[in-house]
Image (spheres, helix red, strand yellow):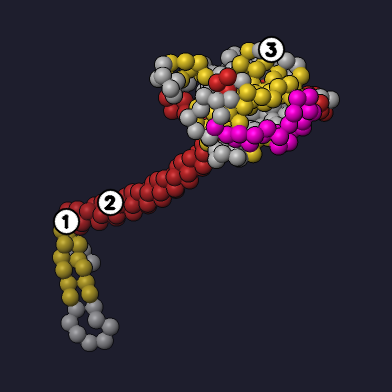
Amino acid sequence: MAVSNRFFTILIVPERHGKSLRWYVGSRTAYLAGIIALLCVAALAGLVIHYTYILGQEFEARHLRSENQALKTQVVAATQKLDIMEKRLLDLSRLDDKLRAMTALADQDRGLATGPSHPAPSSHVSTNRQIVPFASALPRAEPSLRELERLIFDSRLLGIEEESKHQGASLTNLVDYFGMQKSLLASTPSIWPAIGFVTSHFGVRGDPYTGERMMHYGVDIAAPEGAKIVAPAGGRVTFVGQHRAYGLLVAVDHGRGIVTHFAHLRKAHVKLGDAVHRGKHIADIGNSGRSTGPHLHYEVRQDGVPVDPRRFVVYN
């Protein structure tokens, strides 16, 4: 009940007994209180909405962080798998080169010449094609830094795919070729003739007697005196006897101009003209001739020219 036009009356009447309570509130005060109440409600609603938005953003951020961490883990795992695949492909490529070095079969895609090839550096398997890292050009234009890593990853995947296809075709070609060249394989010195430690490689080295830099035309394999020496391939014995600094020497002709020499022997188990097969016991390691201790000096000569025996060994 209004007392006047400028006031509002607030009346509280008890349900049964008691005195009624009455307040007089000015109209301006009532309007102001109403406005303040509306503002408070609006502010509270705004806070609730903002809090809900912040919660949503935090949830989304956590979700994104979780996804990013999962993606990083997947990328690391995928990169490790790529590294393993590249290493395996590199090993296959090296085996491919060694197999081709044993044959007259050229690889036109890589430009690998026929006959024994020089050992490939660790960063590539041929003179014309680099495969570490395996990568192929992608048809993209000026990628951003953010995309660069993904493009490199895609490039490596594409390179591995191309290399694996090439390796599959190449090894299939080699298998077919070797199926028709059994005699060629049997006469190629593709295994080590003795078990021991390689103490001197093919190439220039310091002479053990004079210390001067001289060419070493074979590989020295240290082993106990009397250790077994086997033929690395089939062939025919063309020399057995003393040969100056080589001491007791056995030479085996494998055909196609390839001859192996076994020097500093203690005893020979073959004689001139004998036919031998791969794995046959042909001699014992000794210390004869110009030698500083029991070992086998193993040479491979092609058309009379000494070459690194490792070019022919399939498994090092």
Looking at the image, which residue is at 48% across and 40% down? 76
Q: Is residue 310 above or below residue 195?
A: above
Residue 295 is situated, as x and y percent measured from the top left of the image, at: 55, 33
Instruction: Label 1: state its secondary structure.
Output: helix
Residue 135, located in which quarter of the rendered image? Answer: top right
Res 197 visible:
yes
Q: Which residue is mark 3?
A: 303
Q: Nearer the viewer, mark 1 or mark 3?
A: 3
Instruction: Label 2: state its secondary structure.
Output: helix
Tell me which amino acid carries mark 1: Thr
Q: Which residue is mark 2?
A: 43
Tell me which amino acid carries mark 3: Asp
Looking at the image, which residue is at 70% across and 22% down? 239
Q: CA distance from mark 1 to mark 3?
A: 118 Å
Residue 304, located in which quarter of the rendered image? Answer: top right
Residue 235 is situated, as x and y percent measured from the top left of the image, at: 76, 25
